[in-house]
Image (cartoon, coloured by chain):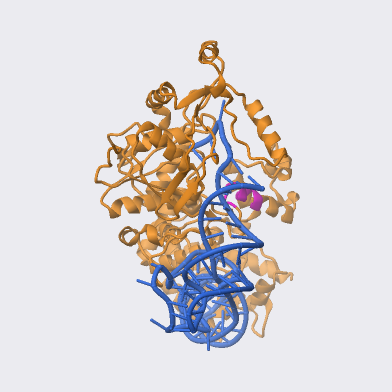
Chain colours: A orange, B blue
Amino acid sequence: MSAPSHPPIVRTRFAPSPSGHLHVGGARTALFCWAFAHQNHGRFILRIEDTDQKRSSDAASVGFLRDLKWLGINWDEGPEFEDCGGGDYGPYFQSQRLETYTKYLDQLVAEGKAYYAFDTAAELDAKRAEARKENQNYRYDRAGLMLPPEDVESRLKAGEPAVIRFKLPEQPIVIRDEILGEATIAPGQLDDFVIRKADGYPTYHFAVVVDDELMQVTHVLRAQEHFMNTARHMVLQDALGFRRPVYAHLPLIFNPDGSKMSKRDKDKALRAAVREKGIDDLSAEFRTTAGIDEWLRDKDRQLEFDSALMLADDLNVSLPEINVDDFRRSGYLPEVLCNYLALLGWNPGGDVEKFDRDFLIEKFSFERVLKSPAKFDRAKLLSFNHDAIQALSTEQFVDLFRAHCNEFHTEFLEKLPPEHFDLLAAANHKRSKTLDDQVRSSRFFIEPDDAIEYDPTDKSARRAMLGGESPGRAHLESLLPILEEQEDWDVVSLERTIGAYVQQHAGGNLGKVAQPLRVAVTGTTISPAIYETLTILGKVSTVNRIRRCLDAFAMA
RNA sequence: GACCCCAUCGUCUAGCCAGGUCCAGGACACCAGGUUUUCAUCCUGGUAACACGGGUUCAAAUCCCGUUGGGGUCGCCA
């Protein structure tokens, strides 16, 4: 007598715990689940594993949903969000499925396949420590199983905290995995693990097994860290008479240095920056923030997201991106992130590297998933993003940049008239690798004229202004009255006027004039194309800044 | 420590399962030269790997064994 078989339709699920944002590793798992389901005309299910009361929060799961949607990974069943979610196998939050778990839990206890245990956390810790000291493997000693039934009943009645443990059968367990192949776990390798916590919630292992069965999940794609857990899930399935889904464990994703990618990396980067630049450089606001000293000293402390963002801005460093949301903020395109993520641990074979989601759906196969972990290379991602940005039409880029600013840099939309905003976006298109990387260097467009700082000791500024036989400063002086007379202030007119000046007085060498102009309007030698830059800035500011610049370099 | 998994350029990887076409191909990064009004690009060229040791075979990156190295798991986290 074999267990009932699965329906002929493929059903995959992504089952994150809603702590924090969607990690890139999780995003890749979701992407593969989604792609595999689509390849087989099946369904992709999203389930929120919020059985840890200490960690779960509703806001976090909403962040997840938005990140997934942004990536273009739509779920057919699960929490309802925009046009996604719904389905007949809900609820899709585990915290709302307690009755279901309890039913199966009771069943196992009644059948003698699971039992109550009253060991306290402290007792267990002590036993583990002792085993460790003697270099022994710790395994639960089945203290709970030895208890007489009347004893158990009375202690339960008295309200003593208790967990339920699964009584592990004494047989080897063979894990079959589409990617890793077969592995045999000898009996005695596992112990009687907890399936219901003292707070009444099921543990992950139990909830997963019950939900995957009830939600008719046919294929489980998850990270390799779950490989050994599979043995636990299998014995539970057998005890409950459940069907066995197909398993496929995906290789892990690490930092370039081999460490685990974690939110802590942001704090790490910030601490390093603070140490390098000195704490005195921090804005007063930050220095007085309570706890900043402790944060600097304590590696395990993490800053609130907004604080970290502010500090990064203050220090002029960019935070390492860890979560999908970080990459969105940094101006990566969702299809590029998907492409890059798909390439971590999988590839279509041959030399093909750039592809879209449809291609992934068509070509994805377990056979081509690698077994060894991969390191996340931001430089390569950036290069992919650069290529994708350059492949965009300027109109498309302008639209995307506007949407990006609308979300993360509204000040540009507020301070620039629409036509100038669009011109700025268009002028930045060719020099952009992300939607965000020119934002910082474009600040001078929206800053007041007297906020521009001139540094006569800066090497390249100095060379542009004072170097050579016909110093830039002299050009600025002669150009100033010409620009003051200039009536039409647009790219074409400025090009005509300045171009003529360059022909007459700079031997046709535009750099001779463009560079000092850049210094004047930005304080640096870096800006978009010069005519666009002056046009966006406007006549008043341009003239003002040239005057201030002339003064600053006069004294040098 | 025990158990499980893995091993090609700095990184992601192709090639391996069906041994010869591989003194190992691509991409990113890096280096050199060139183009460019700045920055960013762009073009050309280059450096760079089969972890080690044994087998099997006419022939091994490809198959087998061992060593070393890496990763995962060993929670009332998921």
What residue appears at the point 44 percent right and 42 percent down from the top-left corner?
A64
Residue A78 shown left or right of residue A512 in the figure:
left
What residue appears at the point 65 percent right and 69 percent down from the top-left corner?
A550
For the N terminus of chain A, the image quarter is top left
Query: Which of the pair B28/A314 is nearer the observer?
Result: B28
Query: Which of the pair A121/A44 is nearer the observer?
Result: A121
Tally the marks.
0
Query: Which of the pair A396/A75 is nearer the observer?
Result: A75
What residue appears at the point 44 percent right and 27 percent down from the top-left corner?
A113
What residue appears at the point 64 percent right and 67 percent down from the top-left corner?
A549
For the C terminus of chain A, the image quarter is bottom right
Q: Is residue A285 visible?
A: yes
Q: Is residue A62 above or below residue A317?
A: above
Write down the region rendered in magenta.
Answer: A260-269
The kind of secondary structure the magenta stretch mainly shows is helix
Q: Is residue A71 visible?
A: no
Magenta highlight on residue A264: yes
Residue A475 shown left or right of residue A434 in the figure:
right
Give percent across and percent down for residue B28: 51, 70
Give percent across and percent down for residue B61: 51, 74
Give percent across and percent down for residue A461: 65, 72
Q: Is residue B59 above or below residue A430?
A: below
Give percent across and percent down for residue A61: 44, 38
Q: Is residue A467 above or below residue A195?
A: below
Magenta highlight on residue A132: no
